[in-house]
Amino acid sequence: MVGPPVFLVNATASLATYLNLRSVREWIFDMAAESDPRMKEDRLPRSVWMLGTEYKLMGAASTAEHESGADAMKRDVRSRLCFTYRTNLAPIGLSQLTTDAGWGCMLRSGQMIIAQALLTHHLGRNWRLPPRTSYKDMPPEYRRVLELFADNPDAPLSVHAIARAGEEVGKRAGQWLGPNTVCSAFKRLHERGAFGADCSLQL
């Protein structure tokens, strides 16, 4: 007997085929959990694993005393850092490109993986972004991690910094960087202290 569908999801994965080409984030924030008729038709997963945490989407709705699995998952997704293509950037590397659109997917994926590792290292896996909190009231550890990835040439883990490290191994900005190249770039940046002086993470 086949049980209800279960999916393994990370913040940057795509369930495009399953969700009729809708993004994971759009689906998560649009879904109505147990009241969604697609649940009863087995068209939506009953359980989702995200970064080692399981969320059961079928069950009681949120109350003042109890948070539903769907709402807990939404809070978790909102707490992840998501980096994507930008335009009108300061010139990147020797190429002088001002956008990473079309070639920076692995750089952005690498940024999100490292950002998640740093958030877990400094705040723990169970930390969640407080709702409706201004930037200045967020934990200093969160702000420090986020600022490492600012899209400017001086930020330690910016697209600019990763592209410069990629150029050291023969990949110019504008060329697609594969996973190995991106990992090598992050390793070089880490060895130069880009993750912060108090960071004991190893690559």
Image: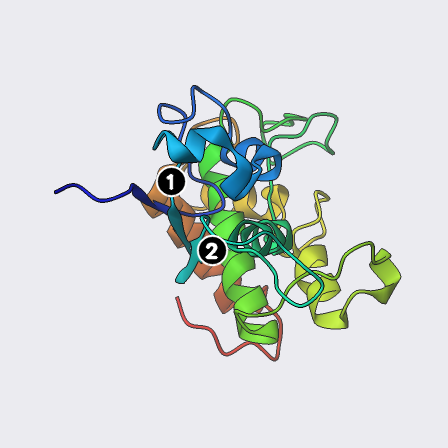
- Residue 51 in view of the camera: no
Q: Earlier in the sequence, mark 1 or mark 2?
A: 1
Residue 202 image position (x, y, % from top left): 41, 72
Front residue of 111 and 163: 111
Name the amino acid, label 1: Pro
Element at label 1: loop
What residue is pinned by disc 2? 186
Residue visible at 86% across and 57% down?
Answer: 134
Residue visible at 58% across and 38% down?
Answer: 32
Name the amino acid, label 2: Phe
- 142 left or right of 80? right
Residue 72 image position (x, y, % from top left): 57, 57
Q: Is residue 11 above or below residue 140?
A: above
Residue visible at 48% across and 30% down?
Answer: 37
What residue is pinned by disc 1? 45
- Label 2 Cα neighbours within 10 Å, binned few <14 / some 14-19 / many ≥20: many
Residue visible at 60% across and 44% down?
Answer: 82
